[in-house]
Image (spheres, rainbow, N blue to C red):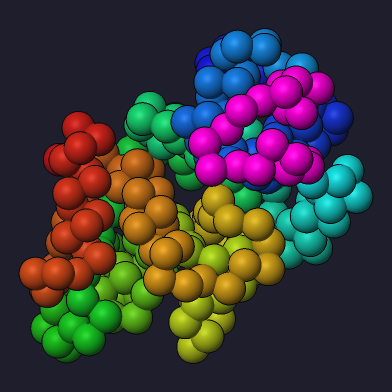
Amino acid sequence: METRIRPLDDRERMDWLRLLRAPGIGPRTFAGLLAKYGSASAALDAFPTLKLRGVDPGATLPSVRDIETEIEAARRAGAKVVALCEPEYPRMLGEIADPPPILFVRGDPALFERPAIAIVGARNASAAGRRFAEEIAAELGAAGFAVASGLARGIDGAAHRGALATGTIAAVAGGIDVVYPPEHAELAARIAAEGAIVSEQPPGTEPTARHFPARNRLISGLSAGVLVVEAALRSGSLITARLALEQGRE
């Protein structure tokens, strides 16, 4: 994939999104097409001739209007559409295998320039666990780290609250304009105002079980290391820890 850091113009940004939303295109295929054709525009021109696994040869591209609607929904939510090659894209995330070509970002992308530590754990955490997560998040923030988590109940929420004053990043499973769980609406608003929220899903996406492993990959990818608090053996938090190890993180 094109790794030179450069801003995209509006037409290129639309081409990137349109290619990414095409049937059968994920981060790895997107990167391969960009490397082969040199630009998203050229890959879009070649799409009718591509033979992609599991995709009907007659599959069509999303319309320009579809992508305009997606970009407008992001704008209404106060989010930026940031491509992998752009300066505002999180550097740590860009170093993992098959990073998301496009991120939606609410808040201050300058936070991505700081080293981040992820704190994740049980949704039904004990009071002691929540207190520990909040305290260590505050200490990490005071030491100059951003704190990343997933906006979930329990440990995630406590970690975000502990780092609100110093900088916290929430990676969410649904669209950038969808708050889950709903009771974290006020917390999400504060994170957007004082930190950053990121999503790779289209605006309006309601999170389902299949979205959370991708969200966990964002959390670990954004971070230099992951701290797990009170996680169950088969929990998403331990998936995040495994992903961190695969990404060469602490």
Relative image position of residue 45 (x, y in whole percent): 81, 22
The one of 163 and 119 positioned closer to us in this rendering: 119
| Quadrant for the C terminus in the image | top left
Please state if 198 lies on the left or on the right of 146 as rendered: right
The one of 188 and 122 positioned closer to us in this rendering: 122
47, above or below 186, in the image: above
Q: Residue at x 25, y 74 (%)?
A: 155
Relative image position of residue 80 (x, y in whole percent): 70, 47
Q: How many marks?
A: 0
Relative image position of residue 219 (x, y in whole percent): 35, 52
Task: Examine the structure image and report whether residue 248 is included in the region drawn in magenta.
Answer: no
The quarter holding residue 38 reads: top right
Magenta stretch in the rendered image = 43-61
Judged by its main secondary structure, the magenta piece is: loop
Q: Residue at x 69, y 36 (%)?
A: 57
The one of 102 and 195 positioned closer to us in this rendering: 102
Task: Examine the structure image and report whether residue 46 is included in the region drawn in magenta.
Answer: yes
Please state if 128 lies on the left or on the right of 223 as rendered: left
Q: Residue at x 52, y 36 (%)?
A: 53
Q: Residue at x 58, y 56 (%)?
A: 201
146, above or below 246, in the image: below
Relative image position of residue 13 (x, y in whole percent): 76, 33
Judged from this view, the residue extending furthest toward the right is: 65
Please state if 147 lies on the left or on the right of 36 as rendered: left
10, above or below 62, in the image: above
The quarter holding residue 82 reads: top right
Residue 120 in view in this figure:
yes
| Quadrant for the N terminus in the image | top right
The quarter holding residue 113 reads: top left
Please state if 24 lies on the left or on the right of 77 as rendered: left
